[in-house]
Image: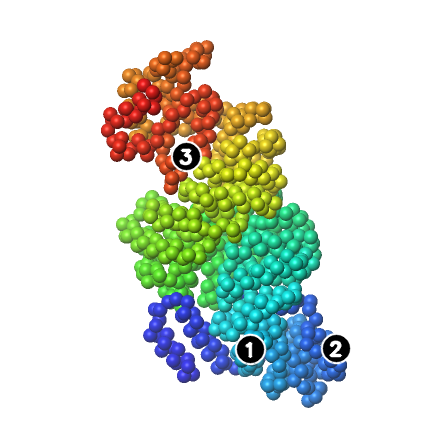
Amino acid sequence: MHSIKRYICFHKNYRRANGPWFLKYRCVYHSILLSEKSFSSTAWLRKSNDIMQNNAFKKVYDVESSNFNFKSLLYTEDDEIIAQLNACSNEGELLAFIKTSEHKFRPIHFVQSILVLKDVFQDLDSGLMDEILKKILRGLTLSLNSLNIIEKSCCYLYLRKIGVPNTNMVMQQLLLNALKCVRNTSSDEPISLNVLSRLGVAINTGQDFHVPTVCSSFIPHIVYHIKYCNTEENLRMLSISIINLQQLITSDILEIFKTKVNIFIEHEIVNSKTIKTVIKLLHLLNLSVWSHKNGQLIRDLMLLLQPNLSNLTIIDLKAISRIFGYHLEPASLIDPLKSLLTDLFQNDPQSDILAAYMPFLEPHRRDAITSVFKNLLFSSMSMQNYNSAAEHFQIIRTLKISDSKLCDAYWENVLDSLKIDQDKDKELRFLIHCHRYMHFNNNLGGSYRFLPLERRLTQVAMEAIENDINGCIPSKFARLAAFVLAYGHTPFGWKKFPNIILSKIISMSDQFNIMDCLYLSRGIQIALELRFRNMIPSLLGFQLATIDSVLADCVERHLENKNLSIFELNTIMRTLGYKKSLKEKYIYQAALERYNLMDYDEINSRAIREMAYNFSASNCTVPIALEAMFTYIEKHHEHVIGETVEKVLSCAFNQGYVPKSESVLGKAATILKRDFKDMNGLSIVQACMALCYYKAMPEDLIDMVFCVKFIQRIEEEIQMCYSKATYPERVLNSIMKLNRTVCLDYPEANVPWFQQNYLEAQLSKKPTPQCKFGDEVKRLLKAVLSSDSYFSCNHITPYGYQIDFVIHFDKNHKPIAAPVETMILDRITKVAILLLRLDSFCKNDLTALRGPEHLRTKHLEMMGYKVIHINEHDWNTKYMNSPKTKTNYLKCLLQI
């Protein structure tokens, strides 16, 4: 009790302290409490198991599979009592035998009793369980010193699996003795991997301990085993150990392990037949803390599974689907996985299988899958466990359902689960719902809100910020604050953010990591879009300026890291991109320039898509990064999917970047044809537009796009789309541009111009552009040409290009009125003046003309125009601030 009192005094004196170190002392406090509790009846068993089954953040990876024969795990000698124990087929027989033969038991017999109990363990509520465990634990109490480290690790692990809590004194002694043995054993003759993996799993079960504190002595043994690992089974056990010791694994240790895995793959020690090991390795490498660093190795391991996908369990297939959904590689897994999951769902239509199928959803099946999901969501068992909410979210987000009744039903279920699980608010389980809601809301462009859930989540988030220890831990606080900032529902929320949030942001500023900055920036972006779109109150403006300053300082601190990864830099760019005010700071340019210093050897499809998004959203170009993206596609074209290729092509086209290698464009076209049926219609059109720009559009791909079947597919997608206000027009406008480009650049394809009616309808709705820049040019042109009859404004060409000014010159280079007779057109010069506004160039390079402007210039020249550009940036420089200078500039351009 003295130790608890000391902790309470410590806590009072440093209540407002924050940072990861505080978590350590909280875990010490929990350990003190555990040591002073006692073992009771079956109530603890039921409660303990419930916690283990329902803990949202549980990361437990078993050493043995569910069908493993535990009875034969340790002892093979001919022992009569062990043979009789092994003959017990249920709890009743086991209890009866222990009662009659307990007096003959040696220490190994109590250990074997645990293994037998693990084998026959069926019913948690069985009245026999309490009595069996009491007898086993009483026997172990007298035998602890006789057990070796292997026996202790087995006893501790399987008693935890059965549900015995760490508060039991026997469990504490088992663990303490095992840890002492690990600590006192030299790493030159290390503890076996079986022991380390079992202890790691057991210590993580229930998440009762601070793993870095309890397991620090494991690392020298792990490093030794990595160095001298030479069998596939040892590699599997290493994977289990590293998973459970993840917080202690440094990047150096991980790199050594990855090197070992690559050697095993090269020598085919790990191959398509070692499924269990490959699965364990994938679980390890895909942990969120370092998944972004392991993309290419994960892809190689996924390829090893391809020949035996049909032999995987449903659980493994779901895991593979989840991994593919994040890394988007390798492409060769799409068809077999899609086929397997389709068959599984037809045989057993459950939401978990449907969620696993979603990364492979074909556009034409979206409507049918939506109907199936409705039935699953409204079934009586739709939210029977925590995983159901995750599965339903995966489905509803991928489908991008705009049906408000269906969305309301899902979030109503989430709200009900929050009301039932009041106790779990302390574990911050609700944060996952905050995260999902913010992303779901983003998917629908902020057009959907479920206010009851927003209020409930804001309430529990504010309670945690104000009263809970999590409100003092930067990584937890950032996620809590992001939701409150985004949706409000706080006092005076209409004019400002809560003061406590602002003060904590300032006090924690030097502790925020890169992801914390992203969460806060995202929360502010949502707030500005949903709540303060039309007006920013003065008090809120001051708060926003303060938060901007904090985020800019944090980003600057992180950019100083010499070991910054592509994933981290992409996250920083996303953080800055969420706030327009941050994009205008010098720090944004500094982050862009950091791309020039990065090592692109370890990029993968996920990193490529994030880079493409950042460059497209910011309208900035980084040639080194763009070339690295094309190089990756060329080198790994068999693994990259069509949607990734489209993102890169569209980004490069919009920035006006031309790849150094022409062959990569041919490979990109091949990928598009391969994945044509799986891609979104708009993505196909946009990718083809980029290929046309590069003059790399193959004729067979033109035929695939310009046919009745594809046009019908586009119409169906428009009917099923979730954003009827913007998506249809965006698709139709893209098709019009592609049709125009193919007609002009590929006349041999004989594609007709069928967009004239659509074009005229769009032009009739489009207002005449008015701007100070254009008006000034028009006024000075009139002065240069002596009359406005010699030029026309906003001229529309046959294929729908709009020209700011058109001037006709005769053969003597004298301006003339636009001729009516077509007979003399070959004797005159048509000059098209295009006003290049600031958005015609990349934002970070005002000499880099964007692709659409390049394409417009080329097409106008094909139509017989001599194209002249007037750059708004040059026009407004101090060197051209007088009308006379600008007039002379126009005369020079027009050669007058």
Q: Which residue does the numbered mark 2 point to in the structure image? A: 87
Q: Nearer the viewer, residue 471 or 106?
A: 106
Distance from the alpha carbon under mark 1 to that under mark 3? 65 Å
Residue under the point 39% across and 21% down:
831
Pair 1/3: label in front? 1
Q: Which residue does the numbered mark 1 point to in the structure image? A: 186
Q: Earlier in the sequence, mark 3 or mark 2?
A: 2
Rendering quarter of residue 49? bottom right
Q: Nearer the viewer, residue 85 or 377?
A: 85
Residue 152 vertical position relative to residue 808 in the rendered view, above or below: below
Q: Point out residue 217 in the picture as x, y percentages from the top left corner.
A: 51, 74
Q: Are marks 3 and 2 in contact (CB under 8 Å)?
A: no
* Residue 390 can be seen, yes or no: no
Q: Please, what is the three-letter code of the amino acid marked with disc 1?
A: Ser
Q: Earlier in the sequence, mark 1 or mark 3?
A: 1
Residue 436 vertical position relative to residue 683 in the rendered view, above or below: below
Distance from the alpha carbon under mark 3 to that under mark 2? 80 Å
* Residue 548 can be seen, yes or no: yes
Q: Nearer the viewer, residue 365 or 657?
A: 657
Pair 1/2: label in front? 1
Q: Please, what is the three-letter code of the amino acid marked with disc 2?
A: Ala
> Considering the image in quadrants, where does the C terminus appear?
top left
Q: Which residue does the numbered mark 3 point to in the structure image? A: 849
Q: SS class of the residue under badge 1?
A: loop
Q: Please state if 880 lies on the left or on the right of 113 as rendered.
A: left
Residue under the point 61% across and 87% down:
142
